[in-house]
Amino acid sequence: MPSEPTQIATTRSRLRDQMPVTKKWAYFDHAAVAPISGSAQEALRAWTEQAACEGDTVWLDWARQVSETRIAAAELIGAHTDEIALVPHTTAGINLVAEGLDWQAGDNIVTLDDEFPSNLYPWMHLERLGVETRMVPTAQGCVDLDQLADHCDERTRVVSVSWVGYANGCRRDLDAIAAIAHRHDALFFVDAIQGLGVFPIDVSKTDIDCLAADGHKWLLSPEGAGIAYIRRECLSRLTPTSVGWNSVVHAADFSRIELDLKPTAARYEGGSHNMAGFIALGASLRMLLDAGTKNIAAAILDLTDRAAEELVALGATLCSPRSDSASSGILSFELPGFDPVAVRKHCLDQGVAFACRAGRLRVSAHGYNNDDDLAKLFDALRSACL
């Protein structure tokens, strides 16, 4: 067995070889919009060539590749392929639950006060039905489980949290939150976009009912192609709200008009797929699966741990929790006395990409980022602070 440092170096090198962005950028903005992988780039190139030169004569092969994406997505999270819906974005996956449940006035949803808007607005929109959205306070993304439990009651229908907080990078204990949700007979929904592909997750062991994530962040794929997981037992509880020709068992037989919904999560895929996007997503998923999410997570945490130490030495104030269980690929920080927008612009000019969120700087590192990238990041930050 290779030692951990050797395995980390191998993982970095293996992924880096497949990331064209490294030729120009030290890229630390995966929590926003990531560069696509070389595998996804090649898949898109092949699709556009076929679409331009062959038209729909190769449509069945595209459909086969999309099916392979569904298989890879299921493998990534330990689900069955029948539990995977291909969706255009995380928001669509959230709305499968928000609009699909049979809500009654007086019901409530419990979520966190630092959620990305996509995991708030679909729930808040249910106020029109008399449904309350309860937001649990967090501290740098950390969840007080007792407080979370206190927000739940006999009318709680859904507990919905992000696996990793987008602003602070706090990785949540999904097993503990699932136990609280199910103790109150509520569904447990996870917005997985900030962790999927780079941290291990297994829905056969962690009792998640529904999950969604787009591919344009850590999955290194184009925008507009994501996945949703709906546990088999939940299919009958979530009414499809956007049905179409592709929702039914006989989807290819357009002359047979019978509303016989598919007995799988594919019932939520009403119309035509974003073929190019899902084919590219499948290529990146296979690349990440081949590298192994445990290996990718180890590479990310190794680099962000060292980055956190250097940030403190630089005089930065860390706004992200750093512990074995809560750390992620996201580091949020402040540089007292310096304008974060100006710092980011200076670093972009130096070939270093990261984000500015809510008056703070946010670095988000992937498994392919290496020591050279880290050196460029801190060279740029130091020169920005002169």
Image (spheres, rainbow, N blue to C red):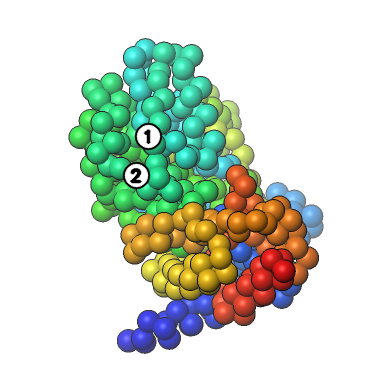
Q: Which residue is mark 1?
A: 136
Q: Quadrant of residue 131?
A: top left
Residue 182, percent from left and from top:
23, 36
Up-down: is 101 above or below 278? above
- Is residue 372 rendered to the left or right of residue 90? right
Q: Name the residue located 58 percent from the left edge and 42 percent from the top edge.
A: 88
- Is residue 72 rendered to the left or right of residue 78? right
User: Can the viewer see residue 371?
Assistant: yes
In the image, 312 versus 119, the foreground residue is: 312
Residue 194, percent from left and from top:
49, 52
Neighbourhood count class around disc 1 (C-alpha, 10 Å): few under 14, some 14–19, many 20 upward: some
Q: Quadrant of residue 75?
A: bottom left
Sequence-first tag of 2 and 1: 1
In the image, 174 versus 340, the foreground residue is: 340
In the drawing, what numbered circle is on residue 143?
A: 2
Q: Amino acid at mark 2?
A: Val
Residue 32, percent from left and from top:
61, 52
Neighbourhood count class around disc 2 (C-alpha, 10 Å): few under 14, some 14–19, many 20 upward: some
Dividing the image into 4 quarters, which one contains the N terminus? bottom left
Q: Name the residue located 40 percent from the left edge and 45 percent from the top edge.
A: 139
User: Can the viewer see residue 222?
Assistant: no
Numbered disc 2: secondary structure: strand
Which residue lies most toward the front here?
Answer: 337
Q: Amino acid at mark 1?
A: Val
Alpha carbons under labels 2 and 1: distance apart? 8 Å
Up-down: is 320 above or below 247? below
Numbered disc 1: secondary structure: strand
Dividing the image into 4 quarters, which one contains the C terminus? bottom right
Up-down: is 136 above or below 284? above
